[in-house]
Image: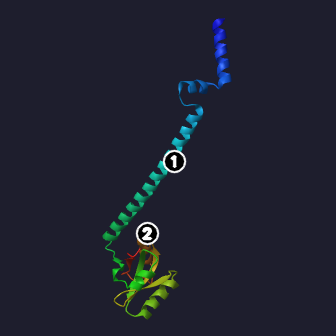
Amino acid sequence: MKKCLMISALALAVCLLGGCDFFRRLAGRPTSVDIAAKRERIELEEAARQRQLDSIKLVQKQISDSLSTLDSLRNAKESIISTRQLSPRGQETLPYRYYVIIGAFSSPANAARQAAKAETAGYPATAIPFKNGFTAVGICPSNSLPEIYASLRDVRKEAFCPASAWILKNESL
């Protein structure tokens, strides 16, 4: 009987005093509220860490894509020309990193004719002045190397595009 009374008193104390948290507090251990808060902090930290890992994976993929594109360009013996040869005005007016160049002309009228052919085919054209007086016609502007390489391959299938089309890299960006 004494044992049953003791167990009942202990059960009543646990119910009235708040359950296990009372004894945990007495023992200096974390309560269920503390444990829930810690679990939430851990989940938030893991989510932040996962976002960082996802961001790193995205950058690694972009680098890998760019490297494979560069290898493809090198194997296909494609040309990428930098903007060092552009006039200062030409460097300032180019808002994109890459352009497909479909011709460079000493006569601005010839450049305008080539630009008109490209625009008729649905490719907005940009006149790009060079230091030596030539004017290049650029289409398919992009900030992505894999994208510009794909554009070069697609544009070469067009009737207005010469086989000698190349990529201009705007180094002022």
The answer to whether residue 7 is above or below residue 70 is above
Q: How many marks?
A: 2
The image shows residue 107 at horizontal and vertical percentages of 40, 94
Q: Is residue 24 above or below residue 9?
A: below
Residue at 48% over, 83% down: 125
Q: Which mark is residue 144?
A: 2
Residue at image coords 57%, 36%: 36
In this image, 10 relative to 134: left or right?
right
Of 24 and 138, nearer the camera is 24
Marks 1 and 2 in Cβ contact (< 8 Å): no
Q: Is residue 146 left or right of residue 41?
A: left
Please name the amino acid that badge 1 sits on. Ala
Q: Amino acid at mark 2?
A: Ser
Q: Position of residue 116 (x, y in %)?
A: 49, 88
Question: Image quarter for residue 71?
Answer: bottom left
x then y, percent, for residue 129:
40, 87
The residue beneath circle 1 is: 47
What is the x, y in percent for residue 120?
Answer: 52, 85
Q: Could you tell me how far apart the alpha carbons at marks 1 and 2 are, in whole angstroms?
A: 29 Å
